[in-house]
Structures are given as C-alpha cells and as structure tokens.
Image (cartoon, rainbow, N blue to C red):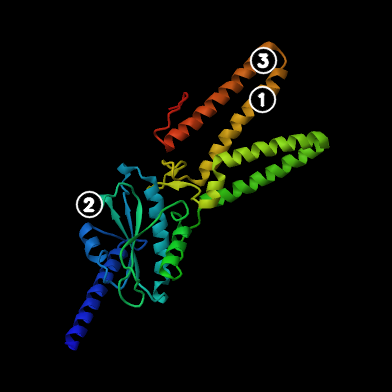
Amino acid sequence: MRLLAMMGLAMAGLCTAQSFGQLQQLGSRDADGVAALRLEQFMEHVVPEDKDYAVVVQLTALAPEYKCDTCQVVDRSLRAVSRGWQKRQAGAGRQIAFATLDVEDGEELFRKMGIDKIPRMMIFPPGRGPHAMRNPSPREMKLNARSSSPSGMASRLSELFHTEIRADEPVSLAAVGKYVLGAAAACGGLFAAARAVRRFSLRRLGRNVWAVGTITFVLVMTSGLMWNRINAPPFIGQTRTGDVVLFAPTNSQQFGVETQIVAAAYAVCALCVVLLVRHTLQVPGSDQRTLVTLLVLASLILTYSYINSVFRLKMPGYPFRLLLP
C-alpha cells in the first residue's frame, strides 16, 4: 500500500511537471513568455488545484474590434512582468507561469462564469509542494490604475507569492516627456516669478500671487492630479498597434496626460473669464472692444464644449453637450 501511495505521488508529480512544461512551451512561442491559451488548455493546465506551480492569467479581449484600451494597458504590464520574471526565475526557486485567455478563445467560460467586465487578472496558486498555499482556490487581483502599471503589478504579485518579481520596462518616451514637461513648467514658473518680482510692487505682487495661487490650486484639484498621485496610472495609453491614446474610454481609469489636458482646458476657461471681466472693457474703440469680446467668448465656449466632449467620451451617459460631439 505504501508503495502504491508513493507511485501515486510520483505520477501526480510527473503530471504537474508535464503541465508546467507545456505552459513553458506555450510561453516560449511568445517573445515575452506569455502563454496564449485555448479553453481546453486553460482547463487542463491552470484550473486544477493539485499543481505545484502558480499561474497568473489575464482574461481579456485584445482584438481591435473590441476597442478595449484598458485591455491593452494591462496586457503590456503583464508582458513587462513576465519578461522580468523570465530573467530571474532560474534562481527564484519557484514556478510561476504567465498566460492570457482571450474572449475569442474562452467565450464559453466567460459566459458560464458570468464575466461581464474585462480585463480581469486571475491568480491560480499552487495547491501542493513547498510553496503551496492554504487556500489553493483561484483569486482575482483587483485592477486599478496602480496595479495596472508594470511596477504596481509586479509589486502586488511579489506580495502575493512572497518572492521578488520585477517588471522589465523599456525606456518610455512618454515618461521622459513627462519629466521634460515638468522641468519646463518649473523653469517657466521661476521665470514668471522673477519677472513679477521686478515688475510689480510687493503689495500688488502679494495680491496677484494669492490670485494665481488660488486659481492654480483649484485647477490642480479639479483636473485629477491627486487621483494620479494616489493611483499612479500610466502617463499615456497605447493600442496594441502602438497608436497613442490620450483618454481612457472609461470613468474608472485615466491616463496621466489627461490631467494636463483637462487642467489646461480649465485654465483657458479661467483666463477667458478674467479677460472678459477685467481687460476687454479697457480695449480702446467700440469696434475693437466688441471684436475682442467675441473672440474671447468664442474661445470660452469652444473650450467648455471640448471639456464636455471629453466627459462624454469617458462616460457615454453624460447628459450635457455644447457644439462639439
């Protein structure tokens, strides 16, 4: 009986080793090591709880006709984490596979599980072996702006598996542009402050500084900057074909560049209001004054219409509309 039990354990170990080997073979067909699964492969190599390896699977829809920009963001992050893991898995002492199940290959499973929102990141932990978890049932990793980024996803998986997982992120031109824009804005602010100190009296300068500071604070708080600081979203989005995406088409996520665009639009609206209230009345000549007033008013209406258009893009049920679709 003991011999039969030992043979059973050996056979089970052989089966799980073969399953993990097949997942690795599927992953080797992909440049980033992510195994593209069909439904039967998912059920055979991922779902069983008696395996001694872990699988991280994204349930997604990457085909262009689904227009799922969030799916593309999560897919790029998963691939970055998979690349990082491939570089250090030999010395990590544990087995983790990364895979993807597209809706086109797992539509039946999605329907049976009642999945009506994608992407989803599922973790299938090992049920036996040295790294077995007490509860080997699958669990979902909640996707937010932070966990959807490569570094955030790697950090979350590191906490879950109690091992170091790093994302292999290529140099991002968007990130470089972000720092360049930030440095340019800081230099511009210092230059403007220096000019203001030389031009205005301290009393007038104090009043203007308070006004500019108040407007800047309002713009920062209404543009979504604090949300970005808390959730650390990607600065800019990209489709699978590499096309740039400025706005995430959902009200539950945003890209960093959205904050700057919305803040700039709010700033234009604020500037137009200030011009209408304080400066257009000082334009000499009634015809010139009327022309300037109409131009500023048109700029205000167009900018506000653009803001409404952005809101409708992110939330199709948004009820307000002005000029732009």
Residue 200 or residue 109, whichever sits in front: 109
Which residue is disc 1 drawn over?
A: 275
Marks 2/1 in contact by CB < 8 Å: the verdict is no
- Distance from the alpha carbon under mark 2 to that under mark 1: 59 Å
Q: Amino acid at mark 1?
A: Leu
Question: Which type of secondary structure does the marked residue at label 1 adopt?
Answer: helix
Residue 78 or residue 142, whichever sits in front: 142
Relative to 56, residue 217 above or below? above
90 left or right of 227 in image: left
Residue farthest toward the top in the current orientation of the protein: 286
Residue 167 seen in the current view: no
Which residue is disc 2 drawn over?
A: 112
Residue farthest toward the front in the current orientation of the protein: 134
State which mark lies toward you, 3 or 1: 1
Residue 294 or residue 7, whichever sits in front: 7
Q: Position of residue 295 (x, y in %)?
A: 60, 20
Label 2: how many residues lie within 10 Å, few (<14), some (14-19) or many (20+)?
few
Q: Residue at x 56, y 47 (%)?
A: 226
- Distance from the alpha carbon under mark 3 to that under mark 2: 68 Å
Which residue is disc 3 drawn over?
A: 288
Q: Position of residue 74 (x, y in %)?
A: 40, 53
Q: Position of residue 202 (x, y in %)?
A: 82, 37
Q: Position of residue 46 (x, y in %)?
A: 27, 64
46 left or right of 162 in image: left
